[in-house]
Amino acid sequence: MKPPPFSYHDPETLADAVALLARLDNAKLLAGGQSLMPMLNMRYVLPDHVVDLNRVGELAYLRESGGALEIGAMTRQADIERSGLARTLCPLMHEAIQQVGHRQTRNRGTLGGSLCQLDPAAELVTVAAATDATVIVVGPNGRRELPFSEFPAGYMTPALKPDEILAGARFPAWSKGHGHAFVEFSRRHGDFAVVAAAALVELDGGGKVQRASLTIGGATAAPVRVSAAERMLAGQKLSDALLREAADHCRRIDAIGDVHAPAAYRRQLAAVLARRALEKARSRLSAAGS
Amino acid sequence: MTDTRAIALIVNGVRREATVETRHTLADVLRQQLGLTGTHLGCEHGVCGACTVLLDGRSVRSCLLLAVQANGREVTTVEGLAPDRTRLHPLQEAFRDHHGLQCGYCTPGMLMTLLELLRENPSPTEEEVRVAISGNLCRCTGYQGIVDAALAAARRLRGEHG
């Protein structure tokens, strides 16, 4: 199996990459290559041009930006995994990323590649939905930002114009002492999740829920926030019964059925994993807040 | 109209030059142009891990990397593991001693992956070894021999008796 013939371009700046993308017909952007390269090897995609972003150094960074964790699109998943800053500002991502693929794929795979591939079961996509991330997009007319909730335009289709490049994303940090958990079920370690659940919980001074975030990945065309559960938790003390009741909202998700799992099984998994994620998040709330 | 490029890379400590088709993977260039057939190709779409090599010290699947992307970088293959022609690396010895291989097809990828793990984590638990090789498929050993070999090699490399 060999990739089909194409012309190869390896720009060194984002501006050059944007200019190439605007000029070339039928061009594909190559990030970490952990999805595009298999598709090229199997000739599922036949681009005339491949624009390799791996030499665009300005897209590989990880920094704190106004109370958020900002990560460049070409930052390797392994670098996020090892980052103390990412672990401090977004422990949910730290937990999720260890479940992304295998060490060999994380050494190459990038944040931007994963977000643009937009697999509904991808851990980083679910984290972006859970944290209300903002994506940063650059095109010929400059830079724009959009909330992650507007990023999925359809199944595995990001809301990017053909001449636009994802430059990075900002993940707002939750308050110190918040609870977090990323729980997934997959057939084998490193596989895409059949269903994944991400939970974030923050308490007020009185030990009641200030805000909560519950996200289910892998069950629908794009990860979905279970807002009914979030509303139910807000302002309440986190009893076992309440967590169970909140998680049960996942049974109403309009889940997809496919070769990996029927829809009813995904709904059941979603409710069970949501409860486990909420319980785990509760157990990680710092003593000061509870 | 073939898109080619001249590249230079360090392979197992030796500078190598080649003119490659830009669509060719690193795995194919290592095997077919540089004559290093120790790197095996199994699935050629990033599932089996047989083609794992180190790129600047990090394990990567060489079937998912274009050779042109390795230009100016350092690549380590299984041929670079043994210290010389008569001795094996402790990982290789441990694989021999603990039934870590049978047909040998997955072995180069297993070795290169475990080399990275043991450099990062000289004292892995059995669980950590199993997670580390979760992206490498073996159809012979049932993995138990490989895990035993990795733990024995770790002890040897720490200076304990394996």
Image (cartoon, rainbow, N blue to C red):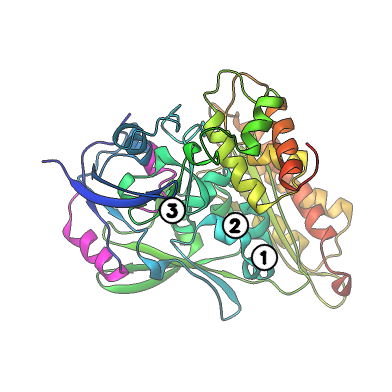
Q: In the displayed structure, would residue A19 be above or below residue A245?
A: below
Q: In the displayed structure, would residue A191 be above or below residue A179?
A: above
Residue A132 coordinates in the image, percent (x, y): 57, 65
Residue A56 coordinates in the image, percent (x, y): 35, 65
Q: Give the magenta range.
A: A13-38
Q: Which SS class for mark 1? A: helix
Of circles 3 and 2, the one toward us is 3
Q: Amino acid at mark 1?
A: Arg
User: Looking at the rendering, which quadrant does residue A211 occupy?
Assistant: bottom right
The answer for how far apart the CA atoms under marks 3 and 1 are is: 21 Å
Judging from the image, mark 3 belongs to the subunit labelled: A
Residue B22 appears left or right of B114:
left
Between discs 3 and 1, the one toward the N terminus = 1
Can the viewer see residue A29? Answer: no
Q: In this figure, which residue is indicated by the disc labeled 2?
A: A127
Q: In the displayed structure, would residue A279 be above or below residue A138?
A: above
Q: Residues within 10 Å of mark 2 (few under 14, many from 20)?
A: many
Q: Which SS class for mark 3? A: helix
Disc assigned to residue A113: 3
Residue B49 appears left or right of A160:
right
Q: Amino acid at mark 2?
A: Val
- In reply to whether residue B138 is colored magenta, the answer given is no
The count of marks equals 3
Q: In the displayed structure, would residue B67 be above or below residue A20?
A: above
Q: In this figure, which residue is indicated by the disc labeled 1?
A: A87
Q: Residue at x 30, y 66 (%)?
A: A12
Of circles 1 and 2, the one toward us is 1
